[in-house]
Amino acid sequence: MRSYTLLACAKINLYLEIVGDRADGYHELAMIMQSVDLCDRIHIEPSGTDSIRVTCNHPDVPCDSSNLAYRAAELMRSEFPEAFARYGGVNIYITKKIPVAAGLAGGSSNAAAVVVGINLLWNLGLTQGECEQLGAVLGSDVPFCIRGGTALATGRGEKLSPLPDLDQLYVVLAKYESVKISTAWAYQTYRATYEETYIRDPEHIEAYGQKVHSGPIVRAIASKDSAIITEELRNDFEKIVLPEYPQLVSLKQRFIEAGAIGTLMSGSGSTVFALTESHSEAERIKAYIEQELHHPDLKLWVAQFSPTGIKVSE
Ligand SMILES: C[C@@](CO)(OP(=O)(O)O)[C@H](O)COP(=O)(O)OP(=O)(O)OC[C@H]1O[C@@H](n2ccc(N)nc2=O)[C@H](O)[C@@H]1O
Ligand SMILES: Nc1ncnc2c1ncn2[C@@H]1O[C@H](COP(=O)(O)OP(=O)(O)O)[C@@H](O)[C@H]1O
């Protein structure tokens, strides 16, 4: 039987506005999500048994049923029992390149790759939309990781509207290995600090009217206007994370000093990214930061915006 190798792209948030409280305990969001070509490699093969097995090269990633890739395979097993009975279990090999707990959706991208990979392995014939719906059960960011490219994400992050691909931008990603921020902590802390500004029980993002401020960046993306995109970068989590981690503030300052056209923390952190208009400029800024900060704990990567979230090869 066939096996598949998939590249699962990281995402960055060019815009993240926390707009309200939801009845289900999640937060209502307006986000611009962007895939970048820093990718984990996921290999999926039939196990020849009825079990799911996950192997990963990263010491901080669990290989048991708490691994999001494992949970994705479990979901497929329970949703498609006949296919499971016919094709059996799977072995999943994960080679991590995306830093862990970094605000780059590493786990979500791995789960996305497993949904897409098992769809192929078991000949399920699911459409991308159907894969995205299954992904939403696994986590708010998983549908975007399946769709990829550039998208406006609303609801709890799972409702996607496509935006034109921003293929002209490059990114330098920087992460202090010791600064690990849990997404649940970030949302809880934000709620505790800003709850009084929340909109209660919002039904639809449109209903927020004036309260949502993503219009200018959406229009700038449509017209591919990098100057306005960089002016409109926003991440509400910066308000609670940056005061706790002054090294991230310095990192942002250094990026601007180095000539980045914009800089922002991604998601709930702790990755900070800088945008540039060329690959050579991104490499130059990476080298500058490595030399200036020269911190063994600080890791940097250069990546390009990607029009896809998952790339498949047999
Ligand atoms: C913050 C973001 C921005 O893209 O990314 P990361 O920083 O994790 O990469 C996402 O909203 C993370 O999405 P994801 O990691 O899929 O979240 P989930 O598994 O659904 O939920 C993790 C935790 O975040 C909270 N959560 C998540 C999404 C949301 N709209 N409201 C929330 O309050 C949940 O209550 C839960 O405690
Ligand atoms: N396949 C996976 N890859 C990475 N982390 C995973 C995976 N499965 C579960 N996790 C756990 O999820 C947590 C969040 O990791 P990750 O998805 O990389 O971060 P973020 O939510 O900030 O984008 C980690 O602490 C890790 O232990």
Image (spheres, rainbow, N blue to C red):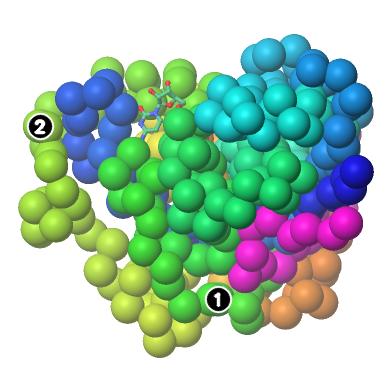
Question: Residue, x 79% and y 17% (percent of image)?
Answer: 50
The answer to whether 305 is drawn above or below residue 181 in the figure is below
User: Which numbered dot is residue 64?
Assistant: none
Residue numbers of the magenta segment: 291-314
Quadrant of the snapshot with the C terminus: bottom right
Mark 1 element type: loop
Q: Amino acid at mark 1?
A: Leu
Answer with left or right where residue 275 lies relative to residue 219.
right
Mark 2 element type: loop
Q: Residues within 10 Å of mark 2 (few under 14, many from 20)?
A: some
Tell me if I can see residue 257 in this picture. Answer: no
Tell me if I can see residue 27 in this picture. Answer: yes
Q: Which residue is mark 2?
A: 200
First along the sequence among labels 2 and 1: 1
The answer to whether 65 is drawn above or below residue 94 in the figure is above
Q: Residues within 10 Å of mark 1 (few under 14, many from 20)?
A: many
Question: Residue, x 74% and y 31% (percent of image)?
Answer: 86
Q: Amino acid at mark 2?
A: Arg
Give coordinates of residue 63: x percent, y percent.
79, 17
Give coordinates of residue 100: x percent, y percent.
71, 31
Q: What whole-number distance in Å separates the C-alpha atoms at marks 2 and 1?
A: 34 Å
Quadrant of the snapshot with the N terminus: top right
Frontmost residue, 136 versus 214: 136
Q: Which residue is mark 1?
A: 166
Q: Magenta includes 261?
A: no
Figure quadrant of residue 106:
top right
Question: Residue, x 40% and y 86% (percent of image)?
Answer: 223
Give coordinates of residue 55: x percent, y percent.
87, 24
